[in-house]
Image (cartoon, helix red, strand yellow):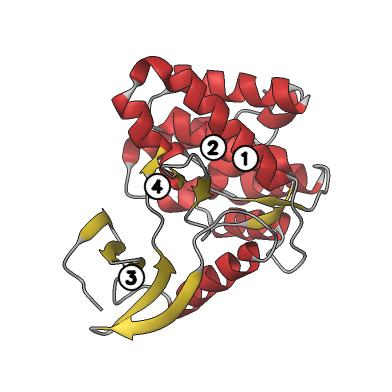
Amino acid sequence: MNLENIIAKRPNKTVFRDGDKCIKMFNKNYSKADVLNEALNQARVEEIGLNVPKVLEVTMADGCWVIIFEFIEGKTLSKFIEENPSDEKKYIEQLVDIQMEIHKKRCPLLTNHRDKMFNKITDSDFDPMTKFELQTHLNGMPRHNKVCHGDLRPSNVIITPDGRHFVIDWAHVTKGNASADVARTYLVYLISGRKEQGEHYLKSFCEKAGTPRSYVERWLRIVAASQSLKAKDNKDEMEFLSKMVHVVSI
């Protein structure tokens, strides 16, 4: 296992390339259960006909858990946008098309999105009344069982030289309501200060899917509460998410 060629680095993981393999190494304090669950989720998604890197092995190296995937040659949508900023809207629309393709799939053994969000609201730092109101709001939302990536963004889509797309990073995949998945991607744009791009993304999805914007927006409070667990050390992001959570109606 060659760990010299770093291709990505995150606070809790580092990704290497070793020939035709992609090696994702997690920090030593990373949950073993979360690593195994990520590998299992991706293996399940492999079996439903989506273009995803195949899981080759789960092992340990230097006391850290490692998932080894097949390496996909190509560039991410975010790289295409960086190189061709005038075509950004075209690439955003491509992201929407890929997301809609994912939503057409079914994978019964995935975690239920509603259950995951309910637990995240419970674990958040919001006051008991806010948690109760959010969970009541969540329970009133329509129940679907579509595959939801959970963190779809341009950096998680690789376009190969022959034009095929592969979606990576399936750690947060669930089955549930597609509009919740869209609200999550829209929130990513807002948090990163890319509101104009986020508006084009949401408009494009709603037009292509025939979904009212207001339907997606009803999920924003829920996904904001979920995101708050990762933003506890970021004062500005927490303030933004808290304001969104406390909006009674959008």
Question: Can you tell which of label 4 and label 2 is closer to the viewer?
Answer: 2
> Disc 1 designates what residue?
99
Q: Residue furthest front?
A: 162
Along the polypeptide, which appears first: circle 2 or circle 1?
Answer: 1
Looking at the rendering, in which quadrant would you find the C terminus? top right
> Disc 4 designates what residue?
231
Distance (Cα) linking label 3 and label 4 = 20 Å
Question: Can you tell which of label 1 and label 4 is closer to the viewer?
Answer: 1
Along the polypeptide, which appears first: circle 1 or circle 4?
Answer: 1
Would you say the residues marked 2 and 1 are in contact, meaning their CB atoms lie under 8 Å apart?
yes
Along the polypeptide, which appears first: circle 3 or circle 1?
Answer: 3
Q: Left or right: where does residue 73 sit relative to residue 103?
A: left
Q: Which type of secondary structure does the marked residue at label 1 adopt? A: helix
Distance (Cα) linking label 3 and label 1 = 27 Å
Q: Which mark is residue 185?
A: 2
Q: Which mark is residue 244?
A: none
Of residues 238 and 51, which is closer to you in this image?
51
